Structure formats: C-alpha cells, structure tokens
Amino acid sequence: MRLFVKIIKGIVLSIVTILALLALGAGWVWLSTEQKEVSFQSGDITIRGTLLSPRFGSEAPGVVLVHGSGQTSRNSTMLYAWIFASQGYVSLAYDKRGVGQSEGGSNEWNEFSVDDLASDAAAGYRYLQTLIEVDPERVGFFAASQGGWVVSLSAKSIDSPGFIVMVSASVSTIAEDRMYGREAQIRYAGFGPDAVAQGLELMILDHQVTRTGTGYDELREAAAGYQGADWYRAINPDLETPLPADAPYRLWERMILDFDPQPLLDTITSPVLWVFGDPDLDRFSPVNLSLNRVEQAKASGMPYDIIQIEHVGHTLELEGDRDMQTLLQVRVPLIWRMFRRLNVHV
C-alpha cells in the first residue's frame, strides 16, 4: 500500500512539475512578445491576421505561417506563431481567403486555386519585409500539409526566401496525394490488398473523367458493381453516384488535379527543412514517396535538411490524438530540433 501511495505521489508530482514548467514557459512567451491585428492586400482582396513580435530587439527574422487544407483560420497556426515569436521571429498568422476576417469567396477554401493561395502567402511575405522591425533578407515560410504546395508556388515569385519549413508536406501531385488518401482510407477501415486495388482502380477511372470529361459511363458502371463490397460501403456509406463529367466540382478539380510542386521545388535555392511523420500513420500524405524525392534532391545538391518522427501521423499527432502527450513528447522536442537546424541559416 505504501509503495502504491508513493507511486501515486510521484505521478502527481511529475504532472504538477510539468504543468508548472508549461505555465512558466507560457508566461515567458506572453511577456516576451507583443500581439496586434494586421491586414495586407493580396490582389483585390484584404487578408487579415495576427502579428506576433518579440518585445526586445530589432531587425528580427520574419516568418509567414501557411495553413493546411480545409476551412482554416489563423488559429490553426497560432501555436507555432507564438513559438517563433518567443524565439525572436516576427510571426504572421492569417485567415485563409474567405475564412474568418479575410475577404474572398465563402467556398474558396474548398474549391481553391493554388495560384490564389500562393499569392496570399507571397503577399504576407512582402508585407513582413516592409516592417521596420523585420530584417527583409531573413523572411521565410512555415508551411503545413497543403501549405507545402502553396509555398512551392509562392517561392517562385520571391527572390530566395530566407528559409522554408515544410511540415507533412507532399512532394507529389494532387492526384498522387488523392490516390494515396484513398488507399489509406481503405486500409485504415480494416481492408486488405484486394480492396485497396479495387478502390484505386475506381479512383483511376474517376481521375480520367475529371481530366478528359470522358469515360463517365464506365466509371458509373464500375461504382455500381462495387456497391455490394464492404470496403465500398465503408468509404461511401450513402452509396452516392459519382459526379457527372460536367459537374462544377469536377470542372474545378480538373484545374488542380495535376498540380506538381516538384519542378517548382527544384528551382528553390533557399534552405528548406522538411519534417515528416510516420509513413504508416500518415493517412493523407504519401510520406515514403515524398521522402524519397526529397532525399534524391538533397543528394543532387539541394539545400535540404530532413527531420522524420516515428509514431506520429499527418499533423504530428500521436495515435489516439492525445493532445497533451503529443505536445510534450512530439511538438516541444521537435520545436527545439527545428530551431537548432534553422539557426544555422537564419
């Protein structure tokens, strides 16, 4: 019994110590940074966000935080914005166009233009360069997931960003990404190689309809043939019929399906830090494919550095989405590794 009580006391003390350290860390971040609401122009629309700056010092490096897919506001990157600011960076987190307080069409987050999103990120970059507290030669990007595609295009319009950090970013076409996502969706639903092969066959037909506007009858017939399969009902429980060839969503998808970041990345001379999770746990991005392409580019002389973290998924979360444990075991150690690598260049 005494041993049990001793163990419980030790656990409680550890938790209290961790919380106290987190509170002290959060307090220091709050005291050492200042926050203000800002806006900048991207073409005809106004993008709004939050600027976090170190209270002490000047001529700081700057970083634009570019979000992943979905209806994402500045909140999705604010944790990293605070951390960058606490390390002496002027950090810009912003609402995606059409989301939060930024202008733009309400559906642009869903039926997006890579060019428009890249223009927004580049506009944020140039905005940081105008600030008196920022060293214009040391401005870079932090991009997560879809943000990797966005920043690969943004960097093309900018003369050598100071640095780029890519977290769970796919070095693949959007079509390749979606093929991988379908495979992962079927695997994580508990089905084997035969079901995966059938699902990919259907996806290939679907992509053909998107690209060419032809083959819809073949796609519809194949989908109808799989309606009795368990794997098909698992990923399409409502048994929805594939979209027609002239559906607005499919016409939009045609514009982005074969977007490929690799040729753009091959022209970037800035140092790029790549952060990948576990290939077996990332359900959205083909980590092995991307990692192989990054390593090949690095071997050819590209200024790339790589951090790979085992046992975490697409957004670097532990399996089961244990928020506090993910923060302590994954994100805090990653942050220190990231800054040690970045400080070589910035």
Image: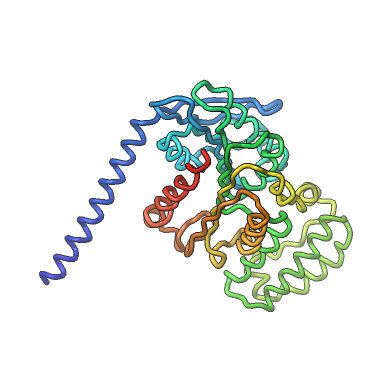
> Which residue shows up at 61% across the image and 29% down it?
47
In the rendered image, is residue 9 in sight?
Answer: yes
Q: How is the image coloured?
A: rainbow
Q: Residue furthest top?
A: 132
* Nearest to the observer: residue 45 or residue 276: 276
Image position of 289 with respect to 104: above or below: below
Residue at 86% x, 67% y is 218
Q: Quadrant of the N terminus?
A: bottom left
Asked if residue 181 can be seen in this view, the reply is no
Residue drawn at 14 percent across, 66 percent down: 5
Identify which residue is drawn at 64% across, 25% down. 41
- Residue 217 left/right relative to 131: right
Q: 292 and 64: which one is in front?
A: 292
- The location of residue 250, given as percent across then percent down, is 79, 52
Q: Is residue 234 above or below residue 322?
A: below
**Residue 92 location, x and y as percent?**
53, 33
Q: Quadrant of residue 112 in the image?
A: top right
Determine the image quadrant of residue 156: top right
Give how far across and how far down residue 233 sits, in percent.
Answer: 66, 70
Query: Where is residue 120 drawn, in percent x and y?
Result: 65, 34
Tell which residue pokes out farthest to the left in this image.
2
